[in-house]
Image (tube, rainbow, N blue to C red):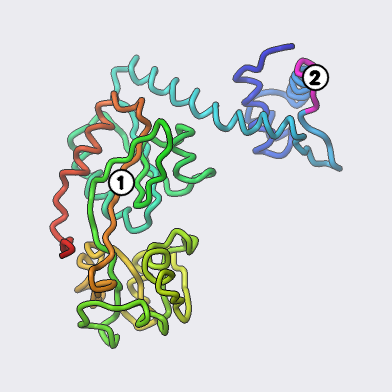
Amino acid sequence: MSRLDRDHLKIIDEVAREGSLTKAAARLNLTQPALSHAIRKLERALGVEIWRREGRKLVLTPAGTALLTLARRVLPQFTLAEERIRQVALGARGKLRIGMECHPCYQWLLRVVAPYLDLWPDVDVDVRQKFQFGGLGALLGHDIDLLVTPDPLYEEGLRFTPVFDYELVLVVGPDHPLRGQKWVSAEQIASETLITYPVPIERLDIYTQFLHPAGITPQAHRPIETTDIMLLMVAHGRGVAVLPRWLVEEHREQFSLHPVRLGEHGLAKQIFLGHREHDEAIAYLRAFIKLAKSIDHGVETPLT
């Protein structure tokens, strides 16, 4: 039996991605007959059928699906290894790929990236917010180097470092009846339209840590993707939102917003940076984490 190699995995990945031999062959710089021959040769060597035709479509068999899963896990690691070897050969520092699992954290991240780029002029930074297999999968699959998340999921081989404490608050507009209150109960939100980022409810702290424990569901739930539109909607009385206090304080005057504590004791959160343990030897990665911990945001009110 022939052994699988990287070229085989690339063929499987490209054919599955493009959905046709013609397009995949063009991506692989092969003719279609050459690609068809390579597929037949691989199937003979492995003793299994990888694709079958359904009309004009190519459909993966169970064996093909298993190989595609392997390809999409292994190929990014080949790419990463080659890139780092090339960087060493060129004397370059590298590229830091950061994944975001926290919508409002993007503005926090900008405060860290700006001075970091000055301190590490030979390091490029790339920020990704969408992942094929989720943030944790992207980290384990070597698609990113750092994961910014308020909700770490601890896995063997990963390390999560807390870099910033903050408080989640209810955000209301200038004419809202809750404006000026020191804190609100879950019952007081029951009649509200709650505006959130487009995240599953089971991953929204306002539900899991505040409303659901009290048996409360808001009157309406409206997902909105961008922070500025969310703040405008709140400012114009179209609903309330739950955001980090530091973010609200930054936009308080611009949008005439008012933060209100969630519950008498507040709702405390942390931003974590997750990375693979074996990457700790990378100096520019360690430097980013250290800088993120040292940034003074100057707007967050400690919980008391």
From this view, report whether residue 237 is shown above or below residue 122: below
Say what amino acid the circle numbered 1 marks. Answer: Phe
* Residue 250 seen by the camera: yes
Q: Which residue is denoted by mark 1 in the rendering? A: 272
**SS of the residue at dot 2?**
loop
Looking at the image, is 242 positioned above or below residue 29? Answer: below
Would you say 23 lies left or right of 270 here?
right
Classify the position of the C terminus by image quarter: bottom left
Q: Position of residue 120 (x, y in %)?
A: 22, 32
Q: Is residue 254 above or below residue 200?
A: below
- Label 1 element class: strand
Q: Is residue 175 left or right of residue 37?
A: left
- Mark 1 is surrounded, within 10 Å at the Cα level, by few (under 14), some (14 to 19) or many (20 or more) other residues, namely many
Residue 213, given in percent of the width and then of the height, sits at: 41, 69
Residue 226 in sight from this viewpoint: no
Judged left or right of residue 51, residue 116 is: left
Image point 30% across, 27% down: which residue? 280
> Are discs 1 and 2 less than 8 Å apart at CB?
no
Residue 17 is one of the magenta-drawn residues:
no
Q: Position of residue 93 (x, y in %)?
A: 28, 25
**Identity of the residue drawn at 30% across and 73% down:** 170
Horizontal side of 131 relative to 98 (left or right) equals right
Q: Where does the image place residue 149, in percent across and percent down from the top left? A: 36, 49
The N terminus - image quarter? top right
Of callouts 1 and 2, the N-terminal one: 2
As for residue 47 lying within the magenta part, the answer is: yes
> Residue at coordinates 43% horizontally, 37% vertically from top-left?
155
* Residue 285 falls in image quadrant: top left
- Give me the disc on residue 47: 2
Q: Nearer the viewer, residue 131 or 303?
A: 303
Disc 2 marks a residue whose amino acid type is Gly
Q: Which residues are magenta?
A: 44-49
